[in-house]
Image (cartoon, rainbow, N blue to C red):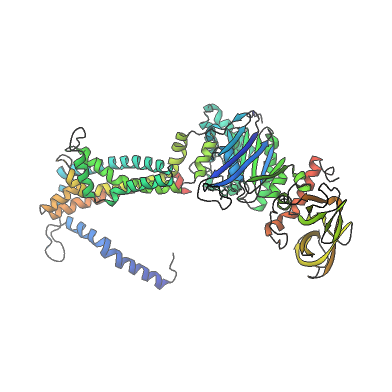
Amino acid sequence: MLVHSRTGRWATWIVFFALFLPLFALPLLVIVAASFSTHWSGAFPSGPTTEHYGAAVRGESLEALTTSLITALTASVLALAVGTWAALAAAALRRRGKRVVDALFMLPVAVPSVVVGLAVLVAFSKPPMLLNGTRWIVILAHGVLVTAFAYQSVSAAVTRLDPAYEQAAASLGARPWLVLWRVKLPLLLPSLNAAAGLCFALSMGELSATMMLYPPDWMPLPVRIFTATDRGSLFTGSAVAVVLMGTTLLVLLAVSRIRTRASYR
Amino acid sequence: MSRQSAPSSGIRFERVSVAYGKRGGLGARGANGTYTALDSFDLTVEPGEVMALLGPSGSGKTTALRAVAGFVQPVSGRVLIGDRDVTALPPHRRGIGMVVQQYALFPHMRVEQNVAFGLKAQRVPRGEIAGRVAEALEMTGMAAYARRYPRELSGGQQQRVAIARALAIRPGVLLLDEPLSALDAQLRSGMLAELARLHRELPDVSILYVTHDQVEALTLADRIAVLDKARLQDCGTPQDLYRRPRTEFTASFVGNANLLPVSVGTGGVRFAGTELAVATVDVMPGADAILCVRPHLVGLGEGENTLRGTIAEVQWRGSTHRLFVDVAGHRVKADVRELRETPALGAAVALHFAAHDAVLLPAGTGQAATGPVAGETDAEAAASTPSVTAVVGAISVAKGAGGDIDG
Ligand SMILES: Nc1ncnc2c1ncn2[C@@H]1O[C@H](COP(=O)(O)OP(=O)(O)O)[C@@H](O)[C@H]1O
Ligand SMILES: [Mg+2]
């Protein structure tokens, strides 16, 4: 530990809780508390119940959960594939070319996601590229939004990758695709892993672009939370939000458990 | 161990020039802002020969090696491996083994997978791979570590695996880029002996061995190519370069010689008002020249050629003392057997050397490697010089080729 004296350590913990509790933990605790109650008129919620959870894991909400999971998984895989490919390609470019690609992939981050949603909506509403009204437009928009993050984290890792490895592989007679498959990608795996988790979490929570695009039969969970609270079902919304949070955390935990030998370096 | 090697093939550089882009490099810049890291480089490594590429850091050694491996594209010239012009060939089709300074073992593969990688890449039949991996690991003494990951090995062991990996594909040509520089001194001398043994076991493999360490080059190489400032300065057998350097650079970089500016007379030379006898005068009388004398061939007291000066510095090096003596404004180094009493600074002394121990070089054959002769206190040179003497002695005995050159 960086702080050695006992009082110093205590002070550090106190500062940590003083910042962490109100900023991060309390709002989450409030939602969890609300999800178990029927009234909240005083300082504390009352009428403990689990009935909201009954609603949250059944019917429409369950459908929304699977919708979100499928959307996030598909968008993440798509983003990872495109982002990795682009990052590898950009690394082979000259400096100016790389800067252009970097800027292009920054766009979805720099532009508000509502605008991205609108752009996707406008672009894919007419034949021959008619995706509007299908689930694919939601997945596509999520893909566009999270590819930027995938590109950035993989690109940083590619830059850090020591060229000595691919050169050693090439000198041993490995053709470029073999170098990519057996050397570069395995070495990048820790970063791909982290990028996948980031993409998944972002997609699971995406609301603003989704709102502009989702068809009636493809409503992701955040939209469901929004409509529930909008209709005044605050406690049901809270329960659904807790389910969303829990599922996302579970998947992230699973992704982070994928051990990569390269990360032991 | 039965082992059929690839048909032996040498390496040939034909006027190879390599330039790097606008960034990097401190030296000469071309008109278009590029930096020439290798300039019209000509060198032939015979099949089965160990050629050391020796030069200071930044002289272009790695660049030359990369040109053979195919990681840089020469702007002009040709690189041949065997009879094959490989200048335009991608690296994976050149059939070379390579070991770099940091080994570059694949961290996500076990030792055996690392060694098998090249065999799989070259589509060696599946049934043959295990045997050849075992053979390569056997040869480098790493058979017991086949199941380990590189991170579980020491530096010296990683080095052996890297060599095993390069040798497993049975290359005709082995490129080694400062392979021992990441090891400590003791391991280094052990690995030097190992490399020599490996080469005896694989006499058909041509080895291009890049190093900045003269001891490594003198110990291991059949011939040494001396590189400085992107150019080939000198090339010859270790004894040749050590005893009869052709340039000032070689003289000072290999073995750290005294370089004295002299004017040539008939039958002798004149240094700072003193007539000195030399064995052969192959420089035009009246011209300026450089007289090159190895520090360990300079003794205390008067002799055939005597220089008088005052002691400027004394370094004790265990079995020897190195004296720095100011002679008419020039600092002369002398390695003498350990003295009972350390000479006092400023004391007047006489130094001598034999006529046949001095080599005359034409002036203007490039600069000395260690800058001005005065003020040489470089620790690395200090540590390695005595062993260089020993090494060359050993080589002369082993190869039976000493004596005749000195005349
Ligand atoms: N990739 C590169 N880009 C630009 N300059 C380089 C590059 N690699 C090497 N150089 C320059 O070329 C010169 C020779 O380098 P190198 O061959 O690595 O020297 P050595 O191996 O003898 O130390 C150095 O001055 C170095 O700065
Ligand atoms: Mg180098």
Residue B56's place in the image compared with B333, above or below, is above
Of B400 and B154, which appears nearest the observer?
B400
Of B375 and B315, which appears nearest the observer?
B375
Residue at x-position 85% and y-position 51%: B278
Of B351 and A7, which appears nearest the observer?
B351
Residue at x-position 45% and y-position 49%: A160
Of A179 and B290, which appears nearest the observer?
B290
Residue B118 spot, x, y in % from top left = 54, 34
Residue A3 spot, x, y in % from top left = 43, 68
Q: How many marks?
A: 0
The quarter in which the N terminus of chain A is drawn is bottom left
Classify residue B388 as left or right of residue A208.
Answer: right
Identify the image quadrant of residue B323.
bottom right
Q: Residue furthest left?
A: A231
Classify residue A19 as left or right of residue B218.
Answer: left
Q: Is residue A254 visible?
A: no
Identify the image quadrant of residue A14.
bottom left
Residue at x-position 52% and y-position 51%: B24
Residue B319 spot, x, y in % from top left = 78, 59
Q: Residue furthest front?
A: B286
Classify residue A242 as left or right of residue A251.
Answer: left
Q: Is residue A64 visible?
A: yes
Residue B176 spot, x, y in % from top left = 62, 42
Residue B93's place in the image compared with B223, above or below, is above
